[in-house]
Image: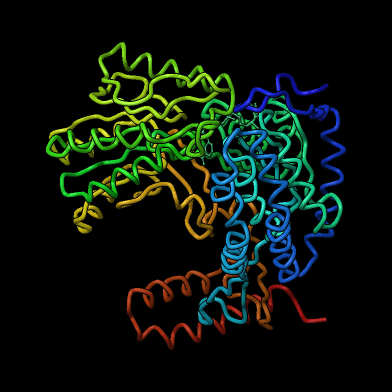
């Protein structure tokens, strides 16, 4: 069955059809992945690193293809895609390799030779097996390679499911992987939530999901039933706090960048700005004036359109709700009429009851709330169901850091926003409705590997607490307890009791054969 309604969102030109994967094909994909994982899991770590880096190099070398697909599927100018999703892929892969070295390193456990004589233990990272990666449409390439690289570095096979809105870029990425990896290590299945649901229900060993809160809840519940790990990274409603002592020009540029990047279709887009009254007029004037200068495709290159019609409806409804409730429109406010474009929008005098403050807008809309002081800004920033990133804009770095620590978010920044999403060493994670998932850094690895401890006992004597339970065991327990409380004099008693216990156990079991 072809995917319905596929249009370039900038031009509304129809795109080529992509075949959906029948849900009945899921078991076959899984069998292939399982066989492939056996091979891939045995490939030495250094070679896996080299393959992952080769995938990244391949993406860069064939970037014109990637940029063309991204332009078709997102409508963005290639320059925005190049900087946002493609140009840093190799440095991301190299960074991910460095992280993997630490995350996957075998750990030696220090066992006390007194408490555990003759024993040693190491903790190893074991690949989960087959990982399902299900992603949304906002960054069709970046969203995949972020979990794909650590999943592969850990020795897993992967089945990817791109969004039904952006299937072509996902398929292209799978082709680049296939060119560098043994067959079946990375596969792609195509379709909507039904196909995604079938993938989760198949016998995969872990799920990485990024998308809406409703879908995330559903997938997390399914994974909980199957007792498999699940990383869910969901929505956001990020706030920026603008203080009277900020560098106004840089703050306007930064807030605009991180609210309009990818036309605001970013889980960490700045959607709410809490600006203190003392600087509010100047800030809003400059923000609105600059927003008006941003050009939407096809009239300029600053912003692409919204990716799909449903998203355009959400953004339009949020702006209408804010205006009906008394917000002041300072820039934009409506669809451009070219494709699914929406003009960069600045709303002033927003209040807590507006959808632009309570719900994720996921569009090029900044809602400004004027607040009397820093305390009120912090309280309002934290009064959200979401908690991904939050930022404070001030020249007083100590003040900024103090406020950042009070933000109820996964990533709190001073004088910047969002960029850690492309840093492989920083855990991309949030709180509340943003979900429990973590992308990137060593903290993402529990989804990709389980830990197996290998314990070797080279002692020739039985352990002193083994059966039988007799008077000497009780005596030994007393001596150990007293010794632990600092009664050093017990040491001689302990030595004699240990030898008594060993003799007792040996005679209980009978002679050596
Ligand atoms: P969505 O939940 O509708 O879809 C996401 C993916 O899940 C798609 O591939 C879809 O086909 C699939 N899917 C849908 N129902 C499913 C089911 N029952 N079982 C399995 N798979 C299913 O989300 P969307 O509208 O595509 O994406 C937008 C959302 O993604 C926004 O809320 C945004 O904030 C969020 N997002 C979050 C992050 C993050 O890092 N926290 C990053 C990017 C996007």
Query: Who's the residue at 40% across and 43% down the image?
Result: 257
Q: Is residue 440 above or below residue 298?
A: below
Task: Name the residue furthest front.
Answer: 299
Q: Is residue 367 left or right of residue 402?
A: right
- What is the quadrant of the N terminus in the image? top right
Task: Provide residue 212's location: percent of width, then percent of height.
Answer: 54, 29
- Residue at the bottom extreme? 492
Rendered image quadrant of residue 238: top left
Q: Residue at x 14, y 34 (%)?
A: 277
Q: Residue 511 is drawn in which quadrant? A: bottom right
**Residue occupying image coordinates x 69% and y 46%:** 66
Query: Is residue 135 in view?
Result: yes
Who is closer to the viewer here, 60 or 299? 299
Q: Is residue 260 left or right of residue 74?
A: left
Ligand 1, seen in the image, is in the quarter at: top right
Q: Is residue 244 above or below residue 48?
A: above
Q: Is residue 306 above or below residue 179?
A: above
Q: Residue 280: where, in percent of width, then height?
A: 18, 35
Question: How far across and down, in percent of the image, does residue 303 sit?
Answer: 49, 35
Q: Nearer the viewer, residue 402 or 228?
A: 402
* Residue 449 visible at all: no
The relative height of residue 217 versus residue 454 in the rendered view (above or below) is: above
Does residue 499 appear to the left or right of 17 in the view shown?
left
| 477 sits to left or right of 175 | left
Residue 294 image offset from top left, x and y in percent? 41, 35
């Amino acid at each position: 069955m072809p995917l319905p309604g596929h249009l370039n969102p900038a031009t509304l030109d129809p795109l080529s059809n992509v075949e959906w994967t029948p849900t009945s094909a899921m078991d076959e994909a899984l069998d292939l992945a399982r066989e492939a994982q056996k091979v891939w899991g045995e490939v030495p770590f250094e070679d896996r690193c080299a393959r992952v880096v080769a995938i990244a190099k391949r993406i860069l070398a064939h970037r014109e293809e990637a940029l063309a697909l991204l332009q078709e599927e997102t409508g963005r100018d290639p320059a925005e895609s190049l900087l946002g999703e493609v140009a840093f892929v190799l440095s991301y892969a190299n960074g991910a390799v460095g992280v993997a070295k630490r995350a996957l390193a075998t750990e030696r456990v220090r066992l006390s030779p007194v408490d555990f004589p003759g024993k040693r233990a190491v903790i190893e990272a074991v690949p989960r097996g087959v990982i399902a990666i299900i992603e949304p449409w906002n960054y069709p390439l970046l969203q995949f390679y972020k979990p794909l690289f650590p999943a592969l570095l850990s020795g897993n096979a992967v089945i990817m499911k791109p969004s039904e809105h952006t299937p072509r870029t996902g398929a292209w990425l799978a082709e680049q992987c296939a060119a560098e990896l043994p067959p079946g290590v990375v596969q792609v299945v195509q379709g909507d939530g039904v196909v995604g649901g079938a993938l989760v229900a198949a016998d995969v060993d872990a799920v990485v999901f990024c998308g809406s809160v409703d879908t995330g809840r559903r997938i997390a519940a399914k994974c909980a039933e199957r007792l498999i790990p699940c990383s869910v990274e969901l929505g956001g409603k990020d706030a920026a706090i603008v203080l009277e002592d900020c560098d106004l020009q840089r703050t306007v540029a930064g807030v605009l960048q991180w609210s309009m990047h990818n036309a605001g279709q970013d889980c960490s887009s700045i959607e709410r700005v809490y600006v203190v009254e003392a600087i509010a007029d100047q800030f809003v004037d400059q923000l609105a004036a600059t927003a008006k200068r941003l050009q939407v495709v096809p009239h300029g290159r600053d912003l692409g359109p919204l990716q799909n019609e449903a998203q355009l409806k959400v953004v339009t409804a949020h702006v209408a709700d804010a205006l009906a409730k008394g917000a002041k429109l300072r820039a934009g406010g409506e669809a451009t009429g070219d494709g699914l474009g929406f003009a960069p929008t600045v709303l002033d005098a927003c209040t807590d009851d507006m959808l632009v403050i309570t719900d994720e807008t996921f569009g090029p809309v900044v809602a400004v709330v004027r607040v009397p002081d820093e305390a009120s800004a912090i309280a309002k920033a934290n009064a959200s169901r979401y908690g991904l990133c939050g930022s404070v804009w001030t020249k007083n770095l100590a003040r900024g850091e103090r406020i950042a620590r009070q933000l109820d978010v996964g990533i709190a920044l001073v004088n910047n926003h969002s960029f850690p999403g492309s840093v492989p060493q920083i855990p991309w994670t949030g709180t509340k409705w943003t979900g429990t998932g973590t992308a990137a850094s060593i903290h993402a690895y529990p989804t990709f590997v389980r830990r197996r401890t290998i314990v070797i006992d080279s002692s020739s004597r039985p352990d002193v607490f083994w059966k039988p339970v007799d008077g000497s065991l009780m005596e030994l327990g007393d001596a150990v307890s007293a010794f632990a409380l600092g009664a050093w004099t017990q040491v001689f008693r302990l030595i004699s009791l240990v030898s008594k216990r060993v003799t007792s156990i040996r005679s209980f079991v009978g002679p050596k054969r």
